[in-house]
Image (cartoon, helix red, strand yellow):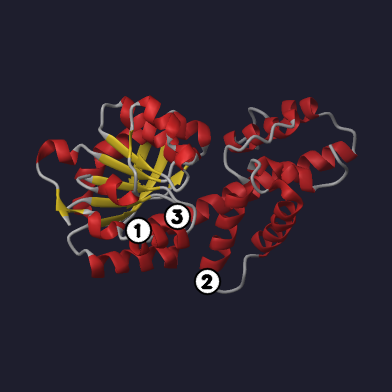
């Protein structure tokens, strides 16, 4: 184990996972003047970050050594546990550091990770802090951070969260952030599938996309995410901002976390998106839900 001493150590941030979100966070942290170490399972992901000024670590263990705040932005609970615990990274955390788990991995899974950390490294604080926002907000440092965990961690992570997010909402004990994130992403997914099906219906009725946009935009039915995905679908631009396979993962996590009967609309959406992923659209943007509907575009 290592111990972080002094302001310099506390100003060091480690980012584990350099995908769409993690790489954007890293760039913003470097630009804000924070010493930022980064590691990813794919070495090719970190090359451009070295050019931006990040310190590329040879291993995840090396990345977290001496860091006051460790961010994980990894896709699933299985990957988080494999990297942090099976890979020995938890043992390399500095005493007193904060681990901000910012990927969406599920509620029960988050609590399992929290409890495992508490048993292995009681001197490390765990913050459950998934984010709302996709590629562009991440690049602009405009993510909404849904934080939950010990109040004593807020001061340590505050300066870091201020760089990568437009707002941090503290929601209580760890696990609450993940609960709110799944609810928010369920809402987002329903909106996006609604846009896709509305566009399909408009095509069947020979209603032009521009005409439909003029009716909706600026009125009570308008919503920024729906408008953005409408125009991506209209342009046939399915470059990933939030990949469909990860949106589907979150839908399925929300269904799994729901108490009582399965929410019927989410269940139907999940079946539809599983078909879209099976058809090869998983790594495209969530707006590729449009491609799974009706006649070929």
Quadrant, the C terminus: top right
Left or right of 100, for residue 96: left
Q: Residues within 10 Å of mark 1 (few under 14, many from 20)?
A: many
Q: Quadrant of residue 51?
A: top left
Label 1 – label 3 distance at C-alpha: 24 Å
The front one of 291 and 22 is 22
Q: Which residue is mark 2?
A: 259
* Above-or-below relation of 248 to 30: below
Residue under the image location 77 percent in, 25 percent down: 210
Q: Tell me if label 2 and label 3 are in contact, CB under 8 Å.
A: no
Quadrant, the N terminus: bottom left
* Residue 265 percent location from the top left of the image: 68, 60
Instruction: Residue 180: give its label.
Output: 3
Q: Quadrant of residue 58?
A: top left
Instruction: Residue 84: give its label.
Output: 1
Residue under the image location 26 percent in, 27 percent down: 33
């Amino acid at each position: 184990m290592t111990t972080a001493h002094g302001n310099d150590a506390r100003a060091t941030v480690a980012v584990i996972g350099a995908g769409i979100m993690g790489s954007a966070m890293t760039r913003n942290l470097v630009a804000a003047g924070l010493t930022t170490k980064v590691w990813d399972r794919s070495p090719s992901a970190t090359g451009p970050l070295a050019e931006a000024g990040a310190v590329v670590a040879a291993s995840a263990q090396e990345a977290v050594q001496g860091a006051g705040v460790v961010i994980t932005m990894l896709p699933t609970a299985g990957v988080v546990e494999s990297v942090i615990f099976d890979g020995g990274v938890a043992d390399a955390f500095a005493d007193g550091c904060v681990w901000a788990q910012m990927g969406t991995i599920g509620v029960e899974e988050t609590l399992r990770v929290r409890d495992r950390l508490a048993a292995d490294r009681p001197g490390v604080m765990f913050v459950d802090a998934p984010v709302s926002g996709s590629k562009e907000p991440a690049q602009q440092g405009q993510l909404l951070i849904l934080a939950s965990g010990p109040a004593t961690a807020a001061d340590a992570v505050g300066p870091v969260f201020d760089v990568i997010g437009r707002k941090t909402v503290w929601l209580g004990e760890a696990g609450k952030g993940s609960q709110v994130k799944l609810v928010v992403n369920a809402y987002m997914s329903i909106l996006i599938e609604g846009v896709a099906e509305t566009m399909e219906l408009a095509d069947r009725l020979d209603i032009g996309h521009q005409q439909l946009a003029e009716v909706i935009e600026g009125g009570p039915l308008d919503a920024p995410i729906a408008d953005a995905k409408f125009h991506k679908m209209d342009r046939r631009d399915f470059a990933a901002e939030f990949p469909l396979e990860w949106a589907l993962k979150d839908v399925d996590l929300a269904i799994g976390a729901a108490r009582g009967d399965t929410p019927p609309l989410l269940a139907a959406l999940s079946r539809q998106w599983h078909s879209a992923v099976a058809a090869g659209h998983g790594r495209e943007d969530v707006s590729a839900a449009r491609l799974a509907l009706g006649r070929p575009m």
